[in-house]
Amino acid sequence: MGILVLNYTTAEGFFVPRLYVQVESIRILKLQGGPNYACSFLSTAWKSPEDKEMGAKPIPIPRDLANSKSVLTADDFYDQTIFGFAYDALKAVWQSAGYTVEDYYPRPPTPKTYIYDCSGYNFRGIKCAQ
């Protein structure tokens, strides 16, 4: 899983038509004085998903695009996995910088990869927005 950033130009001036960005690390910190968690996500980029699989060296990206952050409550973890939140935050960072992004799934998602049941309700019994 990752995202594809369309039409990226590196700091050295090289054009990459579809930059592959993947979350590499996640840091979760409990905020004092409340039930919230501060989450920090670090990502790495490659020229393509195939380059990553072949063991190619990552492409350097600016720190402000490599790092994304989110604040979550304990109940948020019932709605989505931590990687779902990480990729939502990552997409928001790239989109706010003016880039077009697409989700990348190496294999199409199956019903087993979701935590929603078939009727569209999450574990707390709340109807999920589609």
Image: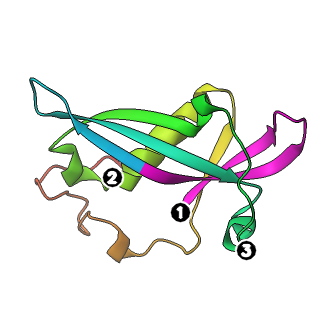
Identify the mark nearer the N-term, 1 or 2. Answer: 1
The residue depicted at 56 percent of the width and 57 percent of the height is: 2
Residue 1: assigned label? 1
The residue depicted at 52 percent of the width and 36 percent of the height is: 67
Tell whether position 2 is magenta.
yes
- Residue density around tag 2, few if under 14, some if 14–19, many if 20 or more, within 10 Å: some
Q: Position of residue 47 (x, y in %)?
A: 77, 56
Identify the mark nearer the N-term, 1 or 3. Answer: 1
> The disc labelled 3 sits on which kind of residue?
Met
Q: Which residues are magenta?
A: 1-25
What is the C-alpha distance between the residues marked 1 and 3? 16 Å
Picture quarter containing residue 104?
bottom right
Q: Position of residue 33 (x, y in %)?
A: 9, 23
Up the image or down, 124 lies above or below 27; here it is below
Q: Is residue 85 left or right of residue 16?
A: left
Q: Which residue is mark 3?
A: 54
Up the image or down, 76 lies above or below 96; here it is below
Residue 90: assigned label? none
The one nearer the camera, 47 or 63, is 63
Q: Which residue is mark 2?
A: 82
The one nearer the camera, 7 or 12, is 12
The residue depicted at 10 percent of the width and 27 percent of the height is: 34
- Residue density around tag 1, few if under 14, some if 14–19, many if 20 or more, within 10 Å: some
- Residue density around tag 3, few if under 14, some if 14–19, many if 20 or more, within 10 Å: few
Picture quarter containing residue 73?
top left
